Each structure stands twice: as C-alpha cells, then as structure tokens.
Image (tube, grey):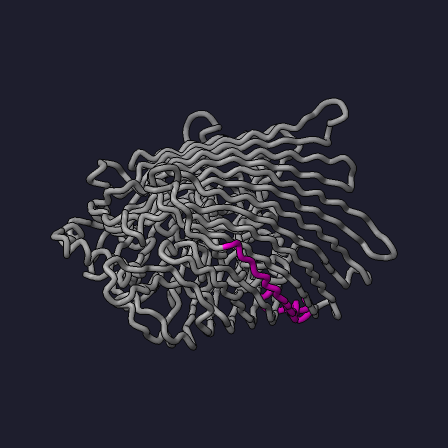
Amino acid sequence: ESLVETSSGEPEQASEESSASRRKTIEEIVVSARKRSERLEETPVAVTALSESTLREAGITRLDEIQDLVPNLQIHGADSGAEANFVIRGVGTSNTDMAFDPGVGVFIDGVFLPRSVGALLDVIDIEQIEILRGPQGTLFGKNTVGGAVNITTTKPKDSVEGFALVRPGSRKTMLARAMLNLPIDFGPFEDKLFTRFSFASVQDGGWVRNVPRKQDWSNRNTLAFLGSLRWLPTDSLTVDVSGSWSQDHSYAAGGQCVFIQDTGLAGLFTQAGYDVQEACDRSEPFRNWSNTSQLQETISYGTWGTIDWDIGEIAGIDLRAKSITSWREQDFRFRQDFDGTDLTIVQISDAGGGSPFDGKPGHQRQIQQEFQLSGTAIDDRLDFIVGYFSLWENGSDNRVVLSGYETAIRFGKENITAIDNFTWALFSQATFRAREWLSFTGGLRYSEDRKGIQQSNIDPFFPDQPADSEPPKSALFPSWTPMGTISVLMPEALLEDTPLDSLLSYFTYARGFKGGGFNGVLNPADINLTDFAPETLDSFEIGFKSILWDQRLTMNIAGFVGLYDDIQVTQLQDLSEEGEIIPNIVQVTMNAARATTRGIEWEFMALPIDGFRVSGSMGLLDAVYADFPDAPSQLDGQAISRAGETFPFSPHLQTHLSMQYALPIDLPGPAWLDGWITPRFDWSYQSAFHFEGPEVWSSNQPAYHLLHLRLSYDFLDDRAQFAFWGQNVTGTEYLQWSMPATVSSWGTAIRFWGQPATWGAELSYRF
C-alpha cells in the first residue's frame, strides 16, 4: 500500500512531477495489481507502488535499493553481484541455481523472469514498480508463493522529450543516463507512431580491496539500452514493442573468511602442513585475500510486445483483449572463491575446453505468450478476466568445483546441467459488486509445469574421457491456485463528520506455489536426479486502507497468516563413507518442512503542512518452522530438528521513515535560478536475522540501521536539478550475504559485507 504520489514519469510534466512533494494533498495512485487499472486505496491487495518520481526523490538507481521502502521485503545479491534473492514475508529462496525456481516472481511489462541471474536490474526508464505481498498464484502464476515484483517501463509519448543525468560518487563511481522520446510525426504515421530510447551506464570502483590481485571488488560495470515503439493503428488498438540489451561485467564482493573448521577440504590442507587458520585470520570485512577472481558477467537481450485491443460492447459486455509475447536470452559466467583465503581450498567456476578457467558461459533462453480477455458487464457491476499463459525455457549451466586436490575423482569435474522446461496455465478472476460498497472476488488458475533436466560430469583435465551421465529426466507438476476476497468500501454518507475520506476493508484467501524440480546442479560427485515437489502457501489476510483529513494522510494496515507446506529446503551434505579422504559433498533439495507465517504491515504518508512530507512503514513478521526434522547442522553435519527456528532472511521487525521539506528559493539574478531546495532523509531499521544455519555464529546478522541523506535544488522551472547525496552516512557495517552451509562440508565460513558510507553529487536535465 504505497503511500506515494502517482507519476507517469513523463518529462513534459517535469514541473508537475517535481512539485508533487509540494502539493497540499496526496495524489491518487493507480496500480495494476489485479491486471487492470485501479485506485490503490480501492484495491484489496497488499501492494506497495513506487512511481518514477518516488524513485528519483529517494535517489534509487538499482532494484535492490527499494528494500528499505517496503515492509517485509528482503533483497540480497548473494555472493554474486548479478543474482537477486527476493524474499517477501519470509518466503523466497536462497538457491540461485538454474534447476531451482525463485519464490518471488519478477515481471517487466508483464514478462516473467524465471531465473534470479540477471534479475538485479538497474532502474532505467521505469514508470512504476509494484511490490505485491503474499501469494499471487491466480493471476501471476508459478513462483509467486511469496509475492511478485511488477515493473512497468515508461511508454513512448506523442511529443519530443529528453532526459540526461550524471551522478559521480566516491570510490570512482560514475552513473550516466539518457533518454530521448521521438514521435514519428509525418505522413501516414502522424499521431500514430512514437519511439523512445534509453541508455544507462554504471562504473563503480567497489569497496572490498583484494590484496593478492590489487583490485577493488564489489564493483559494478554495467551498460544497458532500452528501445520502445508505440503504434496506434486505430483508436481502439495499441501496439507496444520493446527491446533491451544489457551487460554486467563486474566483480562480486570478496568474502571475508571468518573461521576455519578442520573438516572436509580445509582439514586436508591442515593435514598437508598449511596454516589454514592463519590464512583465514588475515581476512577483514573490506580487505580480502581470495586468490581467485570474483568475475560476474551477464549479457541479457530480448524483445517483448503487447497488443491491446478495446473490442467494445458485445451483447452488453464491454470487452478488451490483450496479447503479451516475449523472447529473452542471457549468457552468464562467474568465478567464486568460497574460502576467502589465498589457498585454493574450494572454488566454483564456469568450465569449458581443456581448462576449467576457460570460462564457457552458461546460457538461458525463454519464450512467453499470454492472452487475456477482460471486460465489464451487468451495468459495470461485474469485472472479469480470463487468460492463457505459456512459458518455454531451456538453458545450460557449466560449473566446476576446484580445490588444491583438483585432480581427485570427486572434485575438478565439470558439472554440466541442461534444463528444458515448459509451463502452461489457464486462469480466471472476477469481481462482482453486490452493492455499491460490497464486492466479492473469486479466481482460479490451473497450471502444468513440466521440468526436464540432464546432467553430465566431465573431468576438464581429461575432456576426452567418457562422461558420467544419466539419461534426460522429466517430471510434470500440476497445480491449482484459487483465491477469494470480500471487500467493503465504506459509503461516503457514513464517513460524514469523521476524519475519514475513504475506508476500505477486505479479507482475502490466496494460494501460491513454487515449482518443483530436480537435484543435481552442484553434485559433482554423484549424479542424483531425484525430483522434489512444488511447495505451497495458503494465505489468509485482513486489511484496511484509509484516506483522512482531506487527503493529507493515508494509512494502510494488513495482517496475515500463512500455512506453508512441502517447503523446499536446500542443504549441502557430506555423504562421505568412512575412510574416504576426499569429501563427497552434494547439494540436496527436499520437501522437508512445514511452517506457519504471520505478521502485520503498516504504511502511512502525511502532508502536515504545505511542502512537508512524511512517510514510513513497519513490518512485523513471525516466520517459524513448525516441523523440520533431521536437518543437517551446518556446523558439524549432524541431524538436528529446526522446529521452532525462524526462517532465513526474516527479521521480526523492519521499519522505515522518510521526511522531506520543499522550500522556495528566490535568488538574486536571472529568474531561471529561482527554484526549490529539498532536504530529505531516509532511515531504516532491521532487527536481527540469520542467513542460513543459525548454529553457525557467522550466519547471524545483528540488528542494524541505515541512514541516507539527500539535498536537491530544482531550478529552470523544475526541469533541472542539482543534488548532493549520501548513502549509509553513519558507516554501519552490515552483511549482504553469509555462507555457513560450507562449514560442515568444506570447512570454511565466509561473509560478504554491504556497502559502506558513500557520497556523491547528481545533475539532471529534462526537456
């Protein structure tokens, strides 16, 4: 329930956008959380909407930076700068491998991104980001068991517009962006064909110093292009086509080695006479000793198109049809050091050719098609949508696990995993207004998710030798995802003589699921293509949305309980037999747990005086395993029960507060210098949580807070802006990822630290 002004992001409205924070009332917010445009305060869904102006005012340039603004949302970049782990209300995934599905769906203009690789996007030419909390299985399909992130890009307009921005910062950081909107305004295309082109580049020096290589890691080196075309062949038909290309050639955060345990591979190094603990002790939070490059390279490209046809009225039903078609591919490769020392204890790399360091990339391709038929009937008392969805995806992921014993039979083997997946679904949802103030919504989706996989292990040092492999395997996972909502919009007559302008209350039941799959991606020792089933979550939610005091205050609250079954749990397990020298370490996913989640979310925005805006949110969460027997301890591998243990990535409390005050400035000299100066601060707090395996102390993140500051000056009739900004200005040290799962198996524990204090300036111009 974002409490932010709506903005289309159109530069020709720059003056109106920039003055949004100086309005006397909070503007109406429009969302598409139910695949149709609705006022946020009348939408019975827990959704936060962040418009282009909100992102700009907060200085947000990357998708993971929205975490502070949304209750019960966690976004972690893992040990890779290009991968994103989204967790909503404690539900998500910590496994970013190709054979495993995410728990939170990410959509761009209705196009689903099924893989976490490449999902950590730069915020480029975005009109709005909607974060839907809770299961969204009926309308958005699989892998929305925790929720969905729905991103809408800005579409071409009918006038010449442009935008340019440069943003230098500390550590040799430079961000540059540009946009040009051009209508094709001649001949038969006049008022019918419009184009829009956007560009973004980021150069970030990084904040972790790697001593052996004398490099700065946690850097960013990205380049992105987005082109869009809008064609209006008739008054009732709109065709939108977009294409994008992006490249990320960065070095992920070097992990800090925090302790070594003489088990697994680390123990072998100790036995061989290496002082492993001394090598680990040299590591510091922002000073790394890894002897392997942390290269993270992703190239993504694709195109998508939408045909929207306003059919008109047929037999008393006002109909609209929509088609969404997309194609997307990406190549990716990476190298990761999982011990954080200058010893080659354990590393994972892309493999290919005669050497494991050739860097043969993984590849992923997807084709999606969705058809929708929506409409209204019975004197606009019934809204409905029916549709068909299909997604085909294939890809390969080539990895090798290396150690100082890399010629041993269980390590140094190239692990080639190929997937071939196809999903199709039929869905429908309808809302009936029994009274002007009372509505009933029901929906149902049937999905069939077919997963196919093949895996081979090849020794890259002897690539001509026969591969250890199994025949391709496939499994079919059917799922039903129903939902139902009762909502009451309080009649205006009952709100007279009260501070309330509007009050919506609702109760919702919804189901979501995360797709099943196969084990095998990181099993270099044994090929074990056993499948695991989908996990499901049944959510029960009650919520209230209100507007008060002549649209100067909005306040929304939601409470929820989730019944979480067949939870997919991934653990590294040591299956070594007695007497084996080289550990037999495999990654195993199983449907091993049940749980209950519950919590409360509260958001508000207030305009107490002209120009002064206060907004904030709070998320309370209790996500605890009810049943999780025989889980391997990440400390020593012994079986333990995790019943009563809190989920990973699930702080009990998240809160955020932002304030900004726009003050008019009348400077001597030319009139174009007159403008508005706006100081802003954003403060966020998270209570303690753990990444995985709280029995390993390095997995636990203590409570911490972050403070961001920004001072902007708008001039030239609000078309130009100059700003100073600071992120994490107090220099709080916090973790972005921890890997305790390697302790019992590889004998190492490493942590990856978040961005320290960063300062910079920004200059932008719109026309």
Q: Residue furthest top?
A: 187
Q: Is residue 583 above or below residue 759?
A: below
Front in this rendered view, residue 696 or 478: 478
Report whether 274 appears left or right of 335. left
Report whether 549 appears left or right of 293. right
Residue 679, quarter of picture: top left
Q: Is residue 258 above or below residue 327?
A: below
- Which image quadrant: the N terminus? bottom right
Residue sitting at x 66%, y 67%: 489
Q: How many marks?
A: 0
Most prominent secondary structure in the magenta stretch?
strand
Residue 210, quarter of picture: top left
Does the stretch in magenta take in 472? yes
Image x and y of residue 47, in percent? 55, 59
Image x and y of residue 339, in percent? 25, 51
Front in this rendered view, residue 51 or 106: 106
Residue sitting at x 84%, y 52%: 313
Q: Is residue 175 above or below residue 7?
A: above
- Which image quadrant: the C terminus? top right
Image x and y of residue 533, in percent? 52, 66
Is any part of residue 400 visible from this angle?
yes
Q: Residue furthest right?
A: 315
Report whether 507 appears left or right of 715. right
Q: Magenta part of the protein: which range? A: 471-500
Does the stretch in magenta take in 191? no
Q: Is residue 233 above or below residue 471?
A: above
Residue 379, quarter of picture: bottom right
Is any part of residue 763 visible from this angle?
no
Image x and y of residue 441, in percent? 68, 67
Residue sitting at x 55%, y 47%: 394
